[in-house]
Amino acid sequence: MSSPHAVTEQRISAHLAAGETQAGVALAIDSYGPSLFGYLASRLSREVAEDAFQDLCEQILLAAPRFEGRCSFRVWAFHLARGVRCKVARDPYRRRGSRLSDSQLQGLVERSARTVTAEWRRTDRQVALLQACQALAEEDQAVLLLRIDQQMSWLDVARVIFGQSQSQPELRRQAACLRKRFERTKDKLRTQLARPGGQP
């Protein structure tokens, strides 16, 4: 577990162990919400991402009692976010089901959605990188964002992409494959960004 998130992870685990699911989820959304929203918004329009983010928070709340601790809560939440991201990207105009009813959690969702910004979009080169990423396959884009933007270990990237049910040897094998794929993607992006306007 990386040190920047260690204390937060311990506090979330303590809440869940005590049966304080809403408190644990509220802390997770407050801590990780901006990063999760930024991940969703990297492939979706802001309006659709805001709706998807509320879907994600509801999923986290409902699934948190079943969290087994095989990885960090942060990585587990990103795994759920990837599922939401893929589903919404396929059908961005679908109607949502129920929404969060707890006012505290709803406030956290709305605050995160309002305040989060994708740091790497702010310069011309970062805009070019975003445009380049949009042309990538979903899995390549996800790996790039998780590794560079979220600075996850390769094992954690594999957990987000493939889930936590695999054995350690299988996760290591998947992580090695993702790393090789990542290097190919980086080479492709370097070539693309070196062209005038960063166009393919």
Image (cartoon, rainbow, N blue to C red):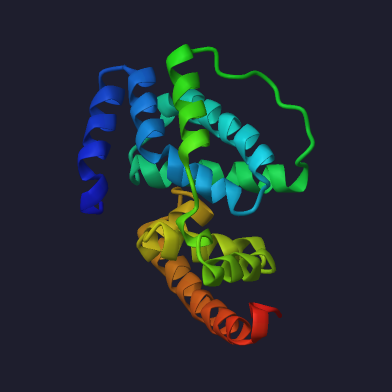
Residue 53, how many percent across, how many down?
Answer: 57, 35
Q: Is residue 18 above or below residue 196?
A: above
So how many labels did they put on this image?
0
Left or right of 95, for residue 2: left
Residue 3, how many percent across, how many down?
Answer: 20, 51
Left or right of 29, for residue 132: right
Residue depicted at 55% across the width and 60% down the height: 142
Residue depicted at 54% across the width and 12% down the height: 101
Front residue of 172/118: it is 118
Front residue of 197/192: it is 197
Residue depicted at 49% across the width and 73% down the height: 177
Kindly indicate the quadrant of the structure image that contains residue 2: bottom left
Left or right of 150, for residue 144: right
Residue depicted at 58% across the width and 65% down the height: 127
Residue 17, how many percent across, how many down?
Answer: 26, 24
Kindly indicate the quadrant of the structure image that contains residue 188: bottom right
Residue 93, how many percent across, how many down?
Answer: 79, 37
Tell me the quarter of the image containing the C terminus: bottom right
Q: Is residue 151 above or below residue 182?
A: above
Left or right of 177, for residue 137: right
